[in-house]
């Protein structure tokens, strides 16, 4: 049984989960949200096959067309709002709006399709949005951490974690890693002259 949610909180903290098509963004938001997530999943049709490359995501029957939304109460005063961005290139124009006012982002990566993550990293860097990279395990790791870092040209200071987006504890670990990363970045800014 879930406890009743407070109607208000003092601080709403926003996190965005981004990445390529079919990497598990909706799954992660669903697995960690304490509320039934708002989802804009729609059934994939044959007409969409001409627009979206589905060769690497066989068996995918639905896709996010706007964003997913979930919530996690951190304490009596702080709430974390999760936004899962759509992964198809035709919806990337929404990302800039989703990044507005965000605390940080998780770039979810399928190591079988690492190149699908470049755009997300480029956009986050262009916005100056702190982020971490989370490799979602599908059929086990196909690349080492160093190979992923090299393939993404990832700054050594950006945390890289492995997760299973289907599991609540794994998703929570990803979010905790992001919040710790953001806190360390702000602490560095406060100590810099």
Image: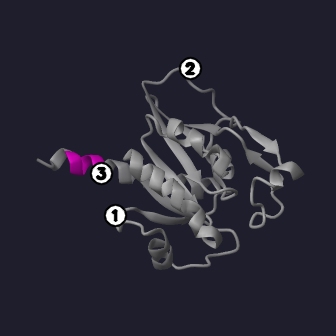
Residue holding disc 3: 185
Foreground mark, 2 or 3?
3
The residue singled out by tag 1 in the image is 157
Distance of label 2 from label 3 (alpha carbons): 31 Å
Note whether 53 is above or below 140 in the view shown.
Answer: above
Closest to the observer: 181 or 172? 181
Sequence-wise, which precedes: disc 2 or disc 1?
A: 2
Left or right of residue 107: residue 35: right
Within 10 Å of disc 1 (Cα), the crowding (few <14, some 14-19, many 20+) is: few
Q: In the rendering, at what x and y percent does residue 101 appear?
A: 43, 34
- Magenta-highlighted residues: 184-189
Q: Residue furthest front?
A: 50
Of callouts 2 and 3, which one flags the residue occurring earlier in the amino acid sequence?
A: 2
Residue sitting at the far top: 7
Asked if residue 13 is positioned above or below residue 55 in the image, the reply reads above
Image quarter hosting the N terminus: top right
Q: Residue at x 57, y 58 (%)?
A: 108
Q: Report the mark closest to the observer, 2 or 1.
A: 1
According to the picture, the residue beneath numbered tag 2 turns out to be 7
Q: Is residue 186 magenta?
A: yes
Instruction: Using the numbered discs, state the Cα–Cα distance from disc 2 to disc 1 in whole angstroms.
Output: 37 Å
């Amino acid at each position: 049984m879930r406890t009743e949610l407070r109607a208000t909180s003092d601080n709403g903290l926003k996190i965005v989960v981004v990445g390529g098509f079919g990497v598990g963004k909706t799954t992660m938001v669903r697995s960690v949200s304490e509320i039934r997530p708002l989802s804009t999943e729609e059934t994939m049709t044959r007409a969409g096959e001409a627009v979206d490359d589905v060769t690497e995501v066989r068996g995918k029957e639905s896709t996010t067309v706007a964003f997913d939304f979930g919530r996690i109460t951190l304490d009596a005063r702080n709430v974390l709002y999760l936004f899962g961005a759509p992964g198809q290139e035709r919806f990337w124009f929404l990302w800039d709006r989703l990044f507005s006012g965000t605390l940080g982002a998780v770039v979810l990566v399928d190591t079988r399709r690492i190149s699908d993550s470049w755009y997300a990293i480029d956009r986050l860097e262009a916005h100056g949005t702190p982020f971490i990279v989370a490799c979602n395990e599908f059929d086990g790791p196909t690349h080492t951490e160093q190979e992923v870092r090299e393939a993404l040209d990832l700054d050594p200071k950006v945390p890289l974690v492995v997760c299973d987006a289907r599991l609540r504890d794994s998703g929570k670990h990803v979010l905790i890693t992001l919040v710790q990363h953001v806190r360390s970045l702000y602490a560095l800014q406060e100590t810099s002259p």
